[in-house]
Image (tube, rainbow, N blue to C red):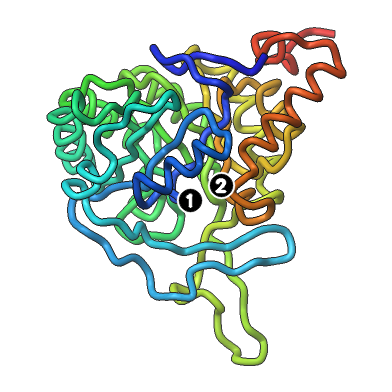
């Protein structure tokens, strides 16, 4: 009932582990798979190793979670060795993040060089982080012009299917998605943390996060992501991954009705434990059975149907 295709790979359900959550090692990715997801998006890799922001890096707020990780990772060379040799039935996506189009191209070339040994189904360009200087929205990425340039640079160097991860924090995501499609992207990943936002410790009279500000994730961002997915579905022909605020099976169904082909789950691991992937799959299946749906294709984009 939940089986679907991800490029040329048949996967058991449309639920992915979002990048940056449980994705630092191959073993942690495999744990997510064992807990029921259909695919995993590895931790984003940069050219050189990064320590990330000083802690505290995560704080729970009234409506979700603020995080400011700062892309801690071992660097592209070590990361590709760590994630290499993927031979599971679940799909693997390698995420890269660069300071500019040239660096994205260099990262993509490294992935292309080892793609046969890697076993990945796709590569993702993360251009949507709201709290890391020099990257994502803090580097001016996410505009239609920058999207065109970055996608073009990656396409010149790598033949793997390309996912472009856009930010809900920048107005005009539909135009950015159009630019990605025109430049050769295969999928839009709509969603990342929203912001940046801040929480202040009123006793210390200082921001709680070590970096001061962070991106908001969790239930509060879901309505924004639903709207973004809905709008992008009307704008482009390439498929969409929905990322942000998905905690239950009904949340996942809502995203698919908005137009998503797949969904990715991150902060729900905090709220419901690493077993959340299998739980969401069960909840999706139960809802579909209760409401007379037999396959995901019947749900996709259903909110766009004329009544």
The image position of residue 17, as x and y in percent, is: 51, 39
- Name the residue located 69 percent from the left edge and 43 percent from the top edge: 247
Residue placed under numbered mark 2 in the picture: 266
Q: Secondary structure at mark 2?
A: loop
Q: Is residue 139 above or below residue 150?
A: below
The image position of residue 305, as x and y in percent, is: 75, 9
- Taking the image as shown, residue 270 lies to the left or right of residue 160, namely right
Q: Which of the marked residues, 1 or 2, is nearer the chain's N terminus? A: 1
- Taking the image as shown, residue 127 lies to the left or right of residue 220, namely left
The image position of residue 227, as x and y in percent, is: 67, 32
Quadrant of the image for the N terminus?
Answer: top right
Residue placed under numbered mark 1 in the picture: 21
- Mark 1 near mark 2, Cβ–Cβ under 8 Å? yes
Measure the alpha-carbon separation of dots 1 and 2. Answer: 6 Å
For label 2, the crowd category at 10 Å Cα-Cα, with few meaning under 14, some 14 to 19 and many 20 or more, is many
- Name the residue located 74 percent from the left edge and 9 percent from the top edge: 294
Quadrant of the image for the C terminus?
Answer: top right
Q: Is residue 252 above or below residue 200?
A: above
Q: Secondary structure at mark 1?
A: loop
For label 1, the crowd category at 10 Å Cα-Cα, with few meaning under 14, some 14 to 19 and many 20 or more, is many
The image position of residue 83, as x and y in percent, is: 29, 41
Quarter-wise, where is residue 158 in the image?
A: top left
Nearest the eye: 175 or 61: 61
- Taking the image as shown, residue 98 lies to the left or right of residue 144, namely left
- Name the residue located 56 percent from the left edge and 78 percent from the top edge: 208
Nearest the eye: 148 or 248: 248
- Name the residue located 21 percent from the left edge and 47 percent from the top edge: 76
């Amino acid at each position: 009932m939940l089986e679907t295709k991800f490029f040329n790979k048949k996967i058991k359900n449309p639920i992915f582990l979002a990048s940056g959550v449980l994705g630092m090692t191959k073993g942690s990715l495999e744990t997510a798979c064992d807990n029921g997801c259909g695919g995993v998006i590895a931790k984003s890799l940069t050219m050189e190793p990064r320590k990330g922001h000083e802690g505290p890096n995560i704080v729970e707020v009234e409506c979700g979670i603020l995080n400011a990780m700062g892309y801690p990772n071992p660097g592209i060379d070590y990361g590709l060795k760590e994630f290499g040799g993927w031979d599971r039935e679940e799909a693997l996506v390698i995420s890269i993040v660069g300071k500019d189009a040239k660096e994205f191209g260099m990262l993509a070339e490294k992935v292309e060089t080892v793609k046969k040994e890697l076993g990945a189904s796709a590569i993702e360009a993360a251009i949507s982080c709201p709290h890391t200087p020099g990257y994502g929205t803090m580097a001016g990425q996410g505009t239609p012009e920058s999207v065109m340039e970055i996608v073009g640079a990656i396409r010149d160097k790598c033949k793997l299917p390309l996912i472009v991860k856009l930010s809900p924090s920048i107005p005009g995501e539909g135009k950015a998605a159009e630019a990605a499609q025109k430049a050769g992207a295969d999928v839009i990943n709509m969603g990342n943390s929203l912001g940046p936002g801040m929480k202040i410790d009123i006793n210390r009279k200082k921001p709680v996060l070590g970096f001061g500000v962070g991106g908001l994730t969790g239930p509060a961002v879901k309505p924004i992501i639903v709207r973004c997915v809905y709008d992008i579905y009307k704008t482009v022909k390439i498929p969409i991954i929905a990322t942000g605020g998905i905690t239950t099976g009904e949340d996942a169904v809502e995203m698919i009705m908005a137009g998503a082909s797949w969904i990715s789950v991150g902060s729900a691991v905090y709220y419901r434990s690493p077993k959340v992937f299998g739980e969401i799959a069960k909840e999706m299946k139960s809802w579909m059975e209760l409401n007379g749906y037999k396959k995901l294709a019947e749900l996709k984009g259903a909110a766009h149907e004329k009544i």
